[in-house]
Amino acid sequence: MACLEVCKEGKFKEGREECTLDGTVDWHGRPAIKDKSGQWFAGIIILLNQGLATLAFFGVGVNLVLFLTRVLQQSNAEAANNVSKWTGTVYIFSLVGAFLSDSYWGRYKTCAIFQVIFVIGLVILSLSSYLFLIRPKGCGNELIPCGSHSSMEVSLFYLSIYLIALGNGGYQPNIATFGADQFDEEDPREGHSKVAFFSYFYLALNLGSLFSNTILGYFEDEGIWALGFWASAGSAFAALVLFILGTSRYRHFKPSGNPLSRFCQVIVAAMKKWRFEMPRDGEEELYNVHAKDCSMNGNRKILHTDGFKFLDRAAFITSRDIDDQKKGCRNPWHLCPITQVEEVKCILRLLPIWLCTIIYSVVFTQMASLFVEQGAAMKTTVSNFKIPPASMSSFDIVSVAFFIFLYRRVLDPLVSRVKKTGSRGLTELQRMGVGLVIAIVAMISAGLVECHRLKYARKDCTHCEGSSSLSIFWQVPQYALIGASEVFMYVGQLEFFNAQTPDGLKSFGSALCMTSISLGNYVSSLLVTMVMKISTEDHMPGWIPGNLNKGHLDRFYFLLATLTTIDLVVYMTCARWYKSIQLEGKRDLTDQEDNFRV
């Protein structure tokens, strides 16, 4: 193996081949060579992998509630409850996958293992559906009910879908981060590509879900369940094979060990020294190891910051620590290096921003629930063709694709010229703020459409479906606005958490995005329950009754717009307070809180 040299320009080279500057390594654990690893060759493989895996996942998830009601003969309430539990489990498993990736396995191994579990779950689901559940043959559509099933057959079904939840949940937060790892952010050109990768990643996710929502969704709605599930299994298997084929070209960050123990060490060490008097300008008094030793498994050092000064006590060197060092040992529960302390500070600074994204996720979840119910109460026929209300989400996906192109090709270069920054348009925090603003407009639009729908509705209808003569295409603006807000909020969120988490916690940063969506579902459910409890007093039908023509869904939309406005104000305060992570050797960037100011 050739020796490593540090050039005067600060570039690492192995022989004459330039290596990456961010500490990534190749498959053999050697410093990654720029021209032979990563970049768009590996990035495109990961984007295709994500699109195929998303197609497979939503091929099951998009019509799971119909499968439970039509095939397993569950009630609407029981089926909806089981789907909610299953969806929540996916997001819980994302934290498990992120922990294993950051701590022990690394992102490549974690992605590969959980994709294998994902494929196994889909194959079991396909086999059990074909052999046991779809009986009599052809059942499971709106006309032919399926027969009863034994407890073993039902158990096999639940085993399969929870293996799918485990596989997709553990894989999802790691694949986005692993894709970003293929670009060296210390290199200006690759750093720009890394930012673009997140936009294309979200686009791949939406294109995969578009195919499953339309083509696979149609087959499953017609009762051809086995074909839909086998198509999902085949797509997941193709994604796994494609992922493995790119093995030799990937760049890797080494896992950093258990972050929970590192966090606890900082808290305990700081509490043990709470009586010590800290010098005002005492950064020189803080424990900092040499550059060649400091990086945990090759991760970059984090520079000291002034916030959360109490935690600095964990790195304050006392006489006892000096004695321990003379003996050749350091007690990690009494003295922690600055980088370890700053890890904890980084996560604490991220939490307020993360909490502010939950209300946006509440707005986002309406697209799969109340938007569909609202659409079902509108005119859904064009000539003799009936438009499924859930298919209106296709306009959201088209909007995502359009606004990703618009932002990358038009808005970002335009803002860069206006700001005269040369390479940056809107920062991640600014884009997330824009996403909140667009979400407010989307809720106002949905509320106005509902007001208009009620004018054309029959108040005495028994069932709300098609009870209003207002066309379902009036919903297009609210779907398009939600899609535009996703481009700014969720893509910006992915970039932000990836950039602002320490090297050893990148997958955890992606998992935060997924848990935000999960909590958004729970908060939305809680909010609907509270609204209905309050609005149904005095024997009133409430804002969201079974018959929407007797309710006031518009008021609920306007309530969400108000809550999102309050959230925007809180978010702007948190964004101005936020201080970005400072990595040693990283290219100088303006602080995020300064960049947020327009």
Image: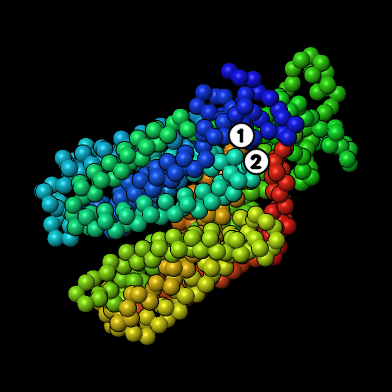
Q: Left or right: where does residue 575 sit relative to residue 87?
A: right
- At label 2, the amino acid type is Glu
- Residue placed at 24% from the left, 58% from the top? 218
**Residue that sits furthest to the left in the current view:** 136
Q: Kindly indicate the quadrant of the structure image that contains residue 21.
A: top right
Residue 406 visible to the viewer: yes
Q: Residues within 10 Å of mark 1 (few under 14, many from 20)?
A: many
User: Which type of secondary structure does the marked residue at label 2 adopt?
Assistant: loop
Please give the name of the residue rendered at 79% of the width and 18% of the height, measured from the top-left corner.
324
Residue 135 position within the rendered picture, expressed as x and y whole percent measured from the top left: 13, 47
Report x, y in % for residue 1: 58, 18
Vertical arrangement, residue 596 with respect to residue 296, above or below: below
Apparent side of residue 100 relative to residue 164 in the rendered image (left or right): right
Q: Earlier in the sequence, mark 2 or mark 1?
A: 1
Against 598, is 181 above or below? above
Q: Looking at the picture, which amino acid does disc 1 mark?
A: Thr
